[in-house]
Image (cartoon, helix red, strand yellow):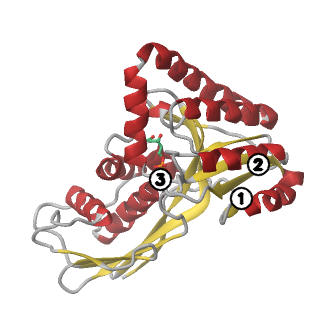
Amino acid sequence: MNSVTASAPGKVILAGEHFVVKGEPAVALAVNLRVYVTVKEGRENITIKSNYLKNKVTLSLYNLGNTKSKIGKVVATILKSLTKDGDIPPLDIVINSEIPPRYGMGSSAALSVALIKALSEYLGLKLNREEVNEIAYKAEEVVHGTPSGIDNTVSTYGGIIVFRRGEGFIRLNADTSSVGLVAAYSGTFKDTKELVIRAKTLSDKYPRVFDPLYHAAGRLALEVAKALKEGNFHAVGELMNVNQGLLSALGVSSLQLERLVYRFREVGAFGAKLTGAGGGGCVIALVPKEALNRVMEAVRPYTNWVKELKVSYEGVRLEVSRG
Ligand code: PMV
């Protein structure tokens, strides 16, 4: 095979981020922003180029792990999982991402999932989705330390899912055609690993305070799933607002995030909350379809990036292979 391209979607979490790390259920959906990865024959090393990387990263075939670059480490982990030692051909990897990194929209998981698909096809391995997902989890560990697995799972399978760490996921069938989902960037990046540690440190310190909050967040996610299925978006929005309060209590919100959250609510969203790790990144809002344009215009002065998102029912997919 001379060249293979695969892609995978990013995600937003409607309910339950952070709480999901300690085993509570959460609801996530894949979105219509994707990462595209092309793998081609290289000259002598592994080279990685990305529209979000200033410089090309090069990995030596004989010492793959010897890199400071995060993306380099992810590629090395994936290559080691897919090949036997010494069996790695020279490769050029080209990444084209529609998902800005560190916005809380699962760019790293989508990159890993797409890369595993492209590489495995290039190497002639026929991996099923479960195998792609398992390897993507290992790659997520390199970036996030102790990921719950929700990001790689929703990126691999697509659609709307209810996920529980250690138990897996179920698909949620919901008709979302009468509602709009909007994401807006808070203006500051976030670091998932650092925020997961922050939430864990605070909740471990006061277990008698936080155990009931974690339990409530888990119940909340299940209520969100039920309301989504019933098409009760007013309830979904209300529960998103409660979820935002719980995330705030966990110390992962910020002034910029709160400003956007309140602006969205003020101008007619059903509900709004941070999404992903928090501390920065994006706010998502659920908005009545007829108010979509008005709401987006009203938040524009508060953000430099606002976008309507759609559910992507397709998870990882092969785009082209030429050989
Ligand atoms: O911010 P993101 O897209 O990396 O999402 C992180 C979600 C967390 O629940 C905070 C962590 C996890 O592993 O589930």
Q: Where is 40 relative to 298, above or below?
A: below
On the image, the x and y values in percent for residue 78 come to 27, 59
Q: Residue at x 52, y 45 (%)?
A: 278
On the image, the x and y values in percent for residue 101 come to 48, 62
The residue positioned farthest toward the bottom in the image shown: 43
Q: How many marks?
A: 3
Judge by depth and name the residue closer to the eye, 3 or 280.
280
Q: Are marks 1 and 2 in contact (CB under 8 Å)?
A: yes
Q: Where is 264 relative to 83, above or below?
A: above
Q: Is mark 1 within 8 Å of ligand 1?
A: no
- Report the Cα–Cα distance between label 3 and label 2: 21 Å
- Locate the N terminus and report the quarter of the image it occupies: bottom left
- The residue under label 1 is which amino acid type? Tyr
- The residue under label 3 is which amino acid type? Lys
| Rendered image: mark on residue 190 | 3
Q: Report the mark closest to the observer, 1 or 3.
A: 1
**Residue 47 placement, left or right of 237:** left
Residue position marked by numbered label 2 in the rendering: 263
